[in-house]
Image (tube, rainbow, N blue to C red):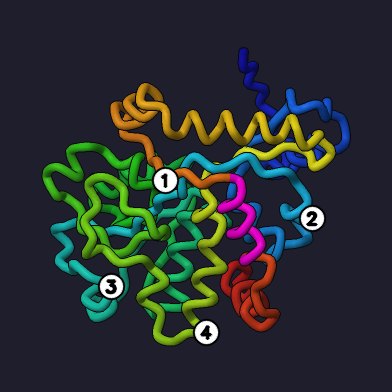
Amino acid sequence: TMVPVNMPGASSVTSILYLDNRAPQDGTFIDTFNFGLLSASLLRPNLAKLDLRKYAWIGSISEDLTACYVRANLGPKTIAQLKAYGPVHFGTDGIGTSEDINERILRSVLGLDIRQVGGYAGSAQVRLAIERGELDGDCGAWSSLPDDWIKKKTISPLSRSGTALPEGLTPDVPYIGDLAPDERARQIINLLVSGSQVGRPFIASAAVPRDRMRILRDAFDATMKDPAFRADVNKLRLPFSPKTADEAVKTVGAIYASPTDVIEAAKKIVTQ
């Protein structure tokens, strides 16, 4: 029996700290958190004082498959065409979200004239503004887009933040890091979107005994391969590109091993 407990506070930092401070450490309490904290712990340490290498990783169900797109009737079909088009208005529902980060990459690293328009209560309101024509595009979770947008091709996808390819997104839509003008810019982009590539994670306190962690990891891996579970995922059109604990740990280690100059450059992008 699984009992979900919502623990709001500091963009889910509260729930992570609870693992070591108050939660039972016998394997019966696990946490899923805002993946943006992975890069935020390096880029905004004043807001997220965490070292996520110091937790026991169970795995991740999927990368965060964010895609940047514009209304199809706008005209541009690629990043290069959009750059030549001129200023465009994208919506944002909060600073530091994956949508916000991807839009900042388009503007600050790839050189697009993106005008971010705030004040929207959530991503649903941003999508309504796009339908009304008051916004030109957005960077948002691909799985959250209306089915008819995809089927009727009312939007033109420009880039994706993950290496996985969700259903309905064609291979010609590039990973945003592949659009970098040089290797250093690619490293900066990779760091900025690194949290989304870990995706939807599950962790426990590092104090949980190893035998209990093995049970949790084996159960997670088995669930990811379970035909009934995968059928439900496909039916609901949910993102699904799982990572084992070892794969997640490797990705997290690479994030924290980022060169100092790359971290500093990325900090400027998320704070400007």
Task: Identify the residue under disc 1.
Answer: 241
Question: Mark 3 or 4 closer to N-term?
Answer: 3
Question: Mark 2 or 3 closer to N-term?
Answer: 2
Q: Hey, which residue is sitting farthest right in the picture?
A: 21
Quadrant containing the C terminus is bottom right
What secondary structure is found at the residue carrying circle 1?
Answer: loop
Task: Identify the residue under disc 2.
Answer: 49
Question: Mark 4 or 2 closer to N-term?
Answer: 2
Range covered by the magenta-colored residues: 245-254
Q: In whole angstroms, how far apart are the C-alphas of marks 1 and 4? A: 27 Å
Res 253 seen here: yes
Disc 2 + disc 3, Cβ < 8 Å = no
Give the amino acid type for the residue marked by disc 3 in the picture: Ile
The structure residue drawn at horizontal position 74% and vertical position 40%, both measured from the top left corner, is: 16
Mark number, residue 188: none
Mark number, residue 184: 4
| x, y percent for residue 206 | 80, 42
Task: Identify the residue under disc 3.
Answer: 79
Give the amino acid type for the residue marked by disc 1 in the picture: Ser
Q: In whole angstroms, how far apart are the C-alphas of marks 3 and 4? A: 19 Å
| x, y percent for residue 55 | 75, 46
Disc 1 + disc 3, Cβ < 8 Å = no
Q: In whole angstroms, how far apart are the C-alphas of marks 2 and 1? A: 28 Å
Give the amino acid type for the residue marked by disc 2 in the picture: Lys
Magenta: main secondary structure equals helix
